[in-house]
């Protein structure tokens, strides 16, 4: 038995300060934990949406870096997204032609020219750039998909795809039907 004078001291219980990704914009006071680090996100929310689109339509607004899922009755769910960087951004109308959970990824030849050290193919999983879910747009190489870099949401960084946090893309994936109209506006 230890006497008070001989008892070992308990180790100090210091609470480490959260580590923020240096690129992470501070959009929300609600930090999320990713791989032991904190990053900030722009929370999705239901908003007033007075434009005349059918419920289930997806509108991507490149300048706003927002995606709207039309609910109808004057409302939509607004999500933050990352969009195509200069020279890779596009606009137009497409339809959801496929939906996949934890999709695999094969970089395009253009991406491999810019980043030759990338793997030629990656199976789906948490480290995959396609993230947790993907909505395939028509017969193009463009997707609305999750990401393994959530701190890039709100930026122009992709090769034309629309990136979302994994949490948000799962929510959108569960709401979206095959054949849904997707309108990308510059």
Image (cartoon, rainbow, N blue to C red):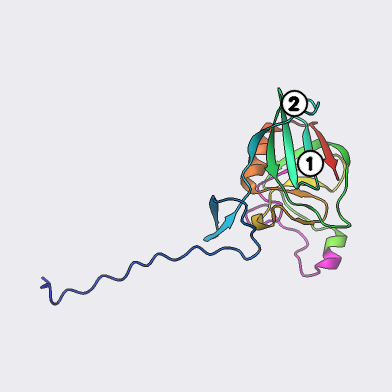
- Rendered location of residue 137, percent (x, y): 82, 41
Marks 1/2: CA–CA distance = 15 Å
- Whether 126 is drawn above or below 112: the answer is above
Label 1 secondary element: strand
Looking at the rendered structure, which numbered label has been put on residue 60?
Answer: 1
Question: In the rendered view of the protein, which quadrant contains the C terminus?
Answer: top right
Q: Is residue 113 magenta?
A: yes
Mark 1 / mark 2, whichever is N-terminal: 2
Residue 62 appears left or right of 14:
right
Residue to which mark 2 is pinned: 55
* Rendered-image quadrant of the N terminus: bottom left
Crowd tier of the residue under label 2, counting other residues whose Cα lies within 10 Å: few below 14, some 14–19, many 20 or above? some
Please tell me the numbered disc located at residue 184.
Answer: none
Q: Are there few (<14), some (14-19), or many (20+) residues within 10 Å of tag 1?
A: many
Residue 158 or residue 63, whichever sits in front: 63
Q: Is residue 31 above or below residue 71?
A: below
Tell whether 177 sits left or right of 11.
Answer: right
The part of the chain drawn in magenta is 112-134
Asked whether 138 or 19 is in front, the reply is: 19
As rendered, which of 181 and 87 lies closer to the eye?
87
């Amino acid at each position: 038995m230890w006497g008070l004078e001989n008892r070992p001291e308990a180790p100090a219980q210091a609470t480490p300060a959260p580590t923020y990704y240096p690129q992470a914009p501070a959009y929300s006071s609600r930090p999320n934990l990713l791989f032991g680090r904190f990053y900030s996100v722009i929370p999705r929310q239901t908003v007033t949406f007075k434009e005349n689109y059918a419920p289930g339509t997806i509108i991507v607004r490149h300048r706003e870096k927002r995606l709207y899922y039309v609910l109808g009755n004057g409302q939509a769910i607004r999500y933050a997204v990352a969009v195509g960087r200069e020279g890779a951004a596009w606009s137009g109308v497409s339809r959801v032609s496929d939906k996949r959970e934890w999709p695999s990824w094969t970089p395009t030849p253009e991406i491999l020219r810019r980043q030759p050290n990338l793997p030629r193919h990656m199976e789906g999983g948490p480290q995959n750039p396609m993230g947790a879910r993907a909505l395939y747009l028509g017969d193009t190489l463009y997707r609305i998909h999750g990401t393994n870099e959530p701190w890039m949401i709100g930026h122009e960084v992709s090769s034309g795809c629309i990136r979302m946090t994994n949490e948000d893309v799962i929510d959108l994936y569960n709401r979206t039907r095959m054949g849904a109209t997707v309108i990308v506006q510059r």
